[in-house]
Amino acid sequence: MSPGLQTTPALGEEAPAFRMKILIADDTSTNVRLLEAVARKLGHQVVVATNGLEALAAFKAEEPDLVFMDVMMPVMNGIEAVKAIRALPTDKWTPIIFISALDEIQDIAQGLEAGGDDYLIKPISPQLLRPKINSYARQIALHRKVHGYAEELTRWREDSEEQTRLGAHVMSRLTDAAGLRDSMVRHFNIPAETFSGDLLCAARAPGEVLNVLLADASGHGLAAALSAMPLTQAFYSMTAKGFPLPSIAEELNRKLIAILPTDRFVAATLASIDVRNQTVEVWNGGNPDALFLNSQGEVATRWASRHPPLGILSEKLFSGMTETVVFNEPGDLILSSDGLTEAENQAGAWLGIEGVIDILGQAQDSGARFKHLLHGVDAHLQGKPGRDDISCLMVSVPIDRRRQFRFATPKSIAQSQFAEWRLDLSYNAQELRYIDVVPAALGLINQISALKEHQGALFLVLSELFNNALDHGLLGLDSATKSWIGGFEIYLQQRAERLAKLRDGRVELSFLLHQDESRAVFDITVNDSGPGFDYPARMEASSALSETNETAFGRGIALVKTLCEQIVYSGTGNKVWCRYVVSDLVLDKNNDIDASLGDKSSPAGGSEDQGSHPI
Amino acid sequence: MQIKLEAAPNKAVLKLNGRFDFHSHRDFRTAYEDAMQETGVHEIVIDFQDVDYLDSSALGMLLLLREKSEAVGKTVSLTGLQGMVKQVLEIANFGKLFTVTG
């Protein structure tokens, strides 16, 4: 080695890469002094022990990074000391270098087997010692760094597992909706990770129409699950208020536009199943075809994706346009995420929408279809985990023309709690084009506590009366169109076209909640600016309709008749008034208690006075 | 995924090859940012002829490209759609967001 090269380690002497604490155990002071001098010169700290026992104690107390250990020492020799040190519990790597005059192969082997990492033979040359110490300093520094990373990783993983556990708990509570337990609905959602980025929702609108949503956020895992979350609340609250599907789609899109970054989006299928009117309405943006299978297992209708996913288009460019189909036989509506159609078998082949249809068609009957699909997906995956979240929502749609609305018998209202309430609303053509009038009015009606439990029935009555005023009164649509085959779709198309062009006209709604003898009644008046219709003739025809001969257009008013006590047309037929019985008014039983508590006024008399106010 | 940038009059063509997924993020961004800096380029064409797989993060990258090019007044068009790529872009209705040629 040339003198020039020797200066290189000398440069590192002032500041070593890693400052070690070195334990030197040797009973010969000259050896200790030599080792100590070299170690200190290299910038390391030194701890000295003069026998094995002291070395063991110093090791425990000082936690050195490197140990030089003599073999032959009094009290406890080096081999014993190293065995004891290596028996100590630790997750830190501390190299031990034996230094001994014993130079037989078996001595060296014995030292290494006892737990030594290296074996130097005395006398030691400082020239060898320096690079040796430097080499260990580098190794230990690297080891400590890697060990630190590993510890950090472990901590991070534990932390992440805890977060995931908590997230999964909260997410399951947030997405668990009673609506999914609807007797018409079955579903599965198999996540690719702990979290599914697929979200399933189902809920009944006030008129008993069933709304369902299957949303698939781009990506999977927690981030995807989070992006789909804002949809739940909007879907449920708008469904509960009776908003139509296009408005729900628009609101969901608006929510996501506000929250998601540009490169994230949520594919979604929304469907509205109206058993009474025998229609299925679908909005599909970015999901595989929604399917309607008849009882023979044949595809009667498929709704392809007609829109980009939610969260991409601005409010102005977004379209909530839906496709509505009339069904004349019972069947199953099937919504799925692309995780289902893109499920891969061992060979990497996708199940595909045709594969899904095949599996569904092979089921014996509608009742077996759902299980059959679940097994079919399992069989296709062949035990391979899905790469994406796989979800499916199936709605069994019955034909139930005789469906009776079973609303709970209303509770009687205490007279003292009852107050008269009236509301008049008026919408012009421009407002009619973009406002969802029925949910808006229902929202106001629902604030009156006496009417809250009637919202289902009132939604149906109000929908019929308002839709008649708008569709026939202002838009001049002919109900007869609906009775043709494929006529309902034409009707809806004409309705959309004419509504978009509507420039004149007005619909007025009046609501009056008041007392009629011993009952609380709710009068609804709907008045449109259209030409009216020949109501005496129509009413006669409607009442002449036999139960079995009921047509689609007759059903609406027939329903209003069953829900309301009276229905009266007037004017040119452009005005309709109906009376809905809310409940009986009773004397407040609690008043007796109140009276006994000191209120000596006559509750019965007071209430009667109130009730006899002119309306 | 490999990306080859080909210059044509007024436009830059990014020819993609292989799997267009999450791992292509950096390469794809670098490629279109280079193309966008060319002042003579009015249109960025993404050629999918040799792409055999496309996932939802690739769709996200296309949406980012669309936003960035709109900001600098350039258009994005998609070409060479075939097989699975065509199917995925059709289901997502990306034809409503981008010009699709061939």
Image (spheres, helix red, strand yellow):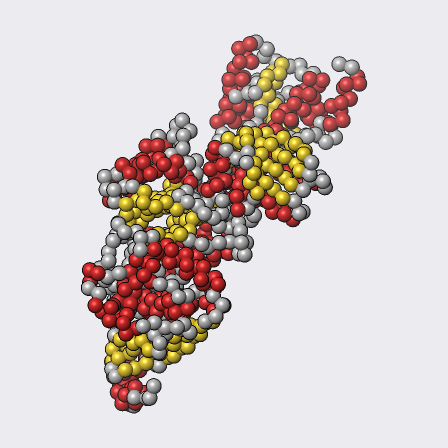
Q: Quadrant of the C terminus of chain A?
A: bottom left
- Hey, which residue is sitting farthest top in the picture? A104
Q: Residue at x 27, y 41 (%)?
A: A297
Please give the name of the residue rendered at 30% of the width and 65% of the height, measured from the top-left corner. A556
Vertical side of A514 occupied by A348: above or below: above
Q: Position of residue A544 (x, y in %)?
A: 21, 68
Question: How many labels were placed on the picture?
Answer: 0
* Residue A222 is at least partly visible in this image: no
On screen, A554 above or below A293?
below
Relative to A6, A608 lies left or right: left
List the single residue furthest toward the right: A4
Quarter of the N terminus of chain A within the rendering? top right
Q: Residue at x 25, y 84 (%)?
A: A517
Vertical comparison of A50 with A176: above or below: above
Q: Is residue A174 above or below residue A35?
A: below
Looking at the picture, tell me which residue is in the foreground, A224 or A342.
A342
Percent coordinates x, y for residue A137 in the rendering: 65, 27
- Residue A497, image x, y percentages: 45, 59
Give the residue displayed 38% in from the left and 34% down from the top: A351
Q: Can the viewer see residue A241?
A: yes
